[in-house]
Amino acid sequence: MTVKVLAFDLDGTLLRKDQTVDPRTADAIHRAIDAGMHVVLATGRDRAGCEFVYKPLGLDKGENFLALVNGQILYDFANKEYDVDDVLTPEDSVKIQNTCRKYGVEGIFCCGYDFYSYLTTPGRVRKQLRRVISGEPDDYGLKAASDVRTFANLPSRGRVIDKDINKVCMIHSPKFFEKNLPKLREELKAYDLLMVGDNWLEIMPHGVSKASALRKVAEKVGCTMNEVMAFGDAENDIPMLKEAGIGVAMGNAMETAKEAASYVTDTNENNGIGKAIDLVLAGKEDLLRCKDAKAEKTAA
């Protein structure tokens, strides 16, 4: 067995639709830790947003890590240390707000635990109407994970955000992104644009990714990226699925994530992670490293 590090995306990967971890998956993770592996939760969330995952699993008690905000912030539990990569600047906030205004799309600027929503006045009216009809909270549930979070609306004329910006979330309909994503990628080509859902696009500083965080983890624990096994389901997982020695896409993953992986396991609803870990613990990790396994093969 050569795997030293296990990295898990959360939503759509480690977490089921009801935001719980399959007990069989939790058991497999604990057996992997007992076998000497380190665990990384690699997520687009901040620390408050994944506390309900790492504490029940006991990850904060060992030599494990959090790769937060798509790898921008690395937290080392054992040493209680943060390592922060590049962030977006006030100048970036102006450029991205201009793009939001041009396309009529909402942009949520994430600054630590403070969130700022930009929308034009007509867009804000439409959002409020949708809220009345659907009952969806104005903040998309972003404040729910912690009472220290704030959510505020920016004026429709825009405003320079004079603080470090971790990322920007663009939110619109799936049809909007199907039509406009190529244009957005061209207009914002100085950044990395990642579809994490059919109506949710995240904008990151160029080169900051879950893979860049995993390289730091590998250096800390004294292994190579070939000894890392990463699990994911969306575009923000693709860099680590490609760079890890074993990249495992969930059965429910986006097609682009499956293409980037070396293996496709079962879904997040059916212990896909646990099944792949069991192959490693059984000495069958070569099955996971084989690119031919991508053809919709699921873990036994």
Image: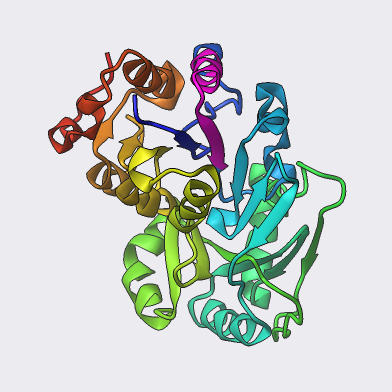
Residue 160: give x, y in percent of width and height.
72, 85
Residue 268 drawn above or below residue 123: above
Is residue 113 on the magenta stretch?
no
Residue 200, visible in the rendered structure: yes
Residue 180 drawn above or below residue 195: below
Horizontally, residue 35 falls left or right of residue 88, namely: left
- In the displayed orientation, state which residue is furthest to the left: 292
Is residue 31 on the magenta stretch?
yes
Residue 20: give x, y in percent of width and height.
60, 23
Horizontally, residue 90 falls left or right of residue 69, namely: right
Image-quadrant location for residue 162: bottom right
Is the C terminus in the top left, top right, bottom left or bottom right quadrant?
top left
Is the N terminus in the top left, top right, bottom left or bottom right quadrant?
top left
Considering depth in this image, is 187 or 71 the residue closer to the camera? Answer: 71
Image-quadrant location for residue 122: bottom right
Q: Which residues are magenta?
A: 26-41
Residue 28 drawn above or below residue 107: above
Q: Residue at x 25, y 29 (%)?
A: 288
Q: Residue at x 72, y 52 (%)?
A: 81
Q: How many marks?
A: 0
Considering depth in this image, is 228 or 140 the residue closer to the camera? Answer: 228
Residue 8: give x, y in percent of width and height.
49, 36
Residue 123: give x, y in percent of width and height.
62, 70
Q: Residue at x 39, y 62 (%)?
A: 177
Image-quadrant location for residue 188: bottom left
Q: What colour scheme was applied to this rendering of the protein?
A: rainbow
Q: Residue at x 44, y 26 (%)?
A: 268
